[in-house]
Amino acid sequence: MLILRMLILGPAHGHTIAAGIERTSENALEVEQGSLYPALHRLEDRGFLASEWGVSENNRRAKYYRLTAKGRKELASSTSRWRQMTRAIGLILGESVD
């Protein structure tokens, strides 16, 4: 879900995706390359992402990933499930929810 969310604004390569997750989470989430790239490949295999080779900011060859229409639907669905789950957990922990 986090990878899909990072690609909502447009195509990005793995390093940019990882940095975006870390920055947006105020460094609470650290993304390891050993988990990022297998996840990107799984998402691509499922049709949620498409990729193409390009040149990075460092003038290096990099694979850029973009969200597909199927990926946008999955992001909406998984975000909804996540919000339901966190609301339920909040209720159990006695947090007030609207």
Image (spheres, rainbow, N blue to C red):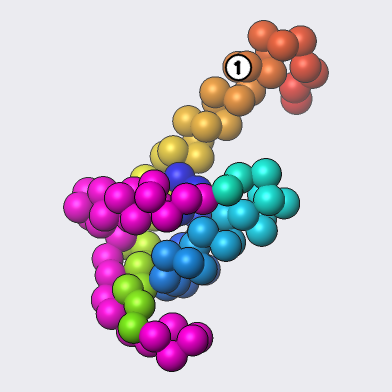
The location of residue 16, given as percent across then percent down, is: 51, 68
Identify whether 38 is placed above or below 63: above
In-image side of 5 versus 42 (left or right): right
The location of residue 58, given as percent across then percent down, is: 49, 86
Asked if residue 71 can be seen in this view, the reply is no
Residues packed near mark 1 inside 10 Å, few (<14), some (14 to 19) or many (20 plus): some
- The residue lying at 44 percent from left, 83 percent from top is 56
Give the residues in magenta: 31-60
Q: Amino acid at mark 1?
A: Ala
The location of residue 92, given as percent across then percent down, is: 67, 9
- The residue lying at 48 percent from left, 67 percent from top is 15
User: Is residue 41 within the magenta segment?
Assistant: yes
- The residue lying at 47 percent from left, 50 percent from top is 32
In-image side of 5 versus 95 (left or right): left
- Provide the secondary structure element on which disc 1 rests: helix
Identify whether 87 is placed above or below 38: above
Q: Residue furthest right?
A: 96
